[in-house]
Image (tube, helix red, strand yellow):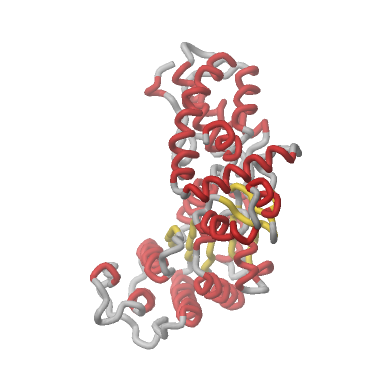
Amino acid sequence: MDPIRNPYAPGAGQRPPELAGRDEQLGAFEVVLERVARGRPERSIVLTGLRGVGKTVLLGALRSSAVRAGWGTGKLEARPDQSLRRPLASALHQAIRELGPSGGAGEHALGVVKSFAQRDAGASAKLRDRWSPGIDVPAVKGRADSGDIEIDLVELLSDVGGMAADTGRGVAVFIDEMQDLGPADVSALCAACHEISQSRLPLIVVGAGLPHLPAVLSASKSYSERLFRYARIDRLSRVEADRALEAPAEDEDATFASEALEAMYALTDGYPYFIQAYGKAAWDRAPSSPITADDVRVGAAEAEEELAVGFFGSRYERATPGEREYLRAMADVSAAAGQGDPDLESVSTADVAKQLGRKPQSLSPARDALLKKGLIYSGERGRIAFTVPHFGTYLREHA
């Protein structure tokens, strides 16, 4: 098979040629955009799921829908060591530029964005901390610059939302890795979304994060369960996974044998990232169409080698020796449970400590560090799970 015509795209946040299994979310978002544009009450949106299920890709697809609807959009990726101010200001600056408002309303919104961004940079701040977005209007004094992030964020989004209403369109802010926002920023964002929703301004936030993101939001504001529309993004069904493979192949005048599709689903479990990785390898190794189960098995070794380095290995390398020991113990405990898919099951922190022959309290630093690094998550008290599918299998076979 011609590698130049290989349609599969295994990459972080890279949109696959066929976005299978996400029609429901895309359709629901179209409804949200139209309702908000008409001044109807709607909630902001939160997408949750494991790594590799396509949250970032779906976030990009939703953003494209908003752009087609004439909305102004901006995107940012949250980081644990970074305040929300500068990246959010950059995202809103882009959204306002996309709307292209002229006159006082647009200049006022840009001035508020500037005052919001510059609030934390004092006269002695280093150059890298002085945000210079290219906004050539003066900062609006006394607006979004109090220093209290909750007050400032409510004022900022209210003014940007008001400007969008004046243009007859809307603004959508997309936040990836939302679970990495600091506690104060999460609280402020919830308060601002609440205010925007009550005011029925045409501005929505679309966040994406790991499975424990709803718990992070709930811990910040008790009303967050009613504030957001939650959508769990999961692996694809067999029919959807087959479509993700077959549709791109058909565009290149190629097909998969039925046994090959069965072998692919057994290898990938329907995870979109794995489908692209194994699909690319099978295509490159197949001598001709149709791609057979033997081609899939030959290509699987290459795909697994690449995943071991780029998808699993890069994450494993971020852990310290003590943290790696904790991860391996988690993998052994989950395998010993023997229920369903062991790599998807959460395990008890007490069982992990027992596996290591240690007291749970002595392992708290390793567990907390792994939580902060996004390698594990805690959906309920006393239990933890991997954020990466098949990670336990990788640890048992390679680590």
Q: Quadrant of the N terminus?
A: top left
Q: What residue do we see at 38% from left, 69% from top?
A: 89
Rendering coords of residue 100 (x, y %): 36, 65
Q: What residue do we see at 50% from left, 68% from top?
A: 182
Q: How many marks?
A: 0
**Relative to residue 370, is residue 284 depicted above or below?**
above
Rendering coords of residue 7 (x, y %): 45, 28
Rendering coords of residue 227 (x, y %): 64, 69
Camera-side residue: 331 or 73?
331
Residue 187 horizontal side relative to residue 134, left or right: right
Camera-side residue: 7 or 161?
7
Rendering coords of residue 196 (x, y %): 56, 74
Q: What residue do we see at 49% from left, 60% from top?
A: 175
Which residue extends farthest top?
287
Camera-side residue: 260 or 73?
260
**Relative to residue 333, is residue 95 depicted above or below?**
below
Which residue extends farthest right?
339
Q: What residue do we see at 44% from left, 73% from top?
A: 160
**Relative to residue 176, is residue 200 depicted above or below?**
below
Q: Is residue 107 visible?
A: no
Residue 334 horizontal side relative to residue 162, left or right: right
Q: Is residue 234 visible?
A: yes
Residue 13 horizontal side relative to residue 393, left or right: left
Q: Quadrant of residue 38?
A: bottom right
